[in-house]
Amino acid sequence: MHEGRSGRARLLAALAVTALVFVIEATASVFANSLALLAESFHVLIDVVGLAIAVGAVWLAARPPTERRTFGLLRLEILATVLNTVLLLLVASVVLVEGLRRFSEPVVVSSRLVLVVASIGLIANVISVFLLRGAHRSLVVRAAYLDVVTDVIGSAAVVISALATIVFDRLLADTLAAFLVVALIVPRAWALLREALDVLLEATPRGVDLETVRRHVADCAGVRDVHDLHVWTVGSGFPSLSAHVLVEPGADCHAIRQELATMLQGRFDLGHSTLQVEHAPTRSRKPGLPLVRR
């Protein structure tokens, strides 16, 4: 309970810091005419949205299940992650289009203002990283954490671009920094989006080999057949398994069920398993029923 409250407190603190950075950077980008600072401010805005969603999702996910929602609101964080990553990709597209336009029509940037504001953003982002470090077990919080981590690199790139413009008078440095921010956004956003969609589509979790799970269940003493095997993820940190297991006539169904549950928890970290265990018929199996032999 204390760890949960501590995590929420750190999320709220990071949200406040990030929101302040967005206001400062967005305002300064208009006066400085800086695409890099604008891109970074939008990236920070997505962090604000992501952190706000994370705070809400963590709070709602902790609410107890009801008769109508027997798994509670665990999927809410997955939906929040999809929203966050889609917004990230949208912002990246806008920045990319504007950056390509500026290659043909370079603009003058108030680099000294950009340098000051980007430095403030860099310091604030580092603070947010330390606030969120160790508090990103759930997918939605991890999405927000990764956003802030990439913001550190993005802010550093904006600082370097401002210095390059001031010292070497490189007008395109600001645009190149904006492209770097886009390059940081897209791969991470895409990876998180794929992971979230896998959860929504109830795909087998990454790192779980279904055939290996099937083989270990079939190798359990007394098991004759296993089918209708499914492994999916309800929410972050909540993998689930269901299967129909046929055992030898006269075998102890309850004991085998307990043994299988212990094996699945210890070997595959599948702590939530629903196993239908029953005796196989003494006669030959029915046609079409898949058989896995030990």
Image (tube, grey):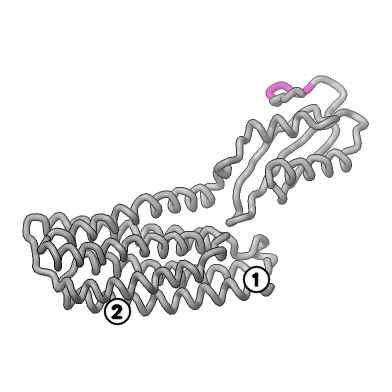
On screen, residue 89 versus residue 12, left or right, reads: left
Q: Which residues are magenta?
A: 285-289
Residue type beneath disc 1: Glu
Residue at 13% of width from left, 59% of height from top? Answer: 172
**How far across and down, in percent of the image, does residue 25 sit?**
28, 75
Residue that sits furthest to the right in the current view: 250
Name the residue that disc number 1 marks. 3
Residue 289 found in image quarter:
top right
Q: Which mark is residue 24?
A: 2
Q: Quadrant of the C terminus?
A: top right
Label 2 crowd bin: few (<14), some (14–19), many (20+), radius 10 Å: some
Looking at the picture, tell me which residue is in the foreground, 237 or 274.
Answer: 237
On screen, residue 228 versus residue 109, left or right, reads: right
**How far across and down, in percent of the image, does residue 261 sit?**
78, 44
**How far across and down, in percent of the image, does residue 160 sit?**
24, 63
On screen, residue 139 versus residue 223, left or right, reads: left
Q: Quadrant of the N terminus?
A: bottom right
Residue type beneath disc 2: Ile
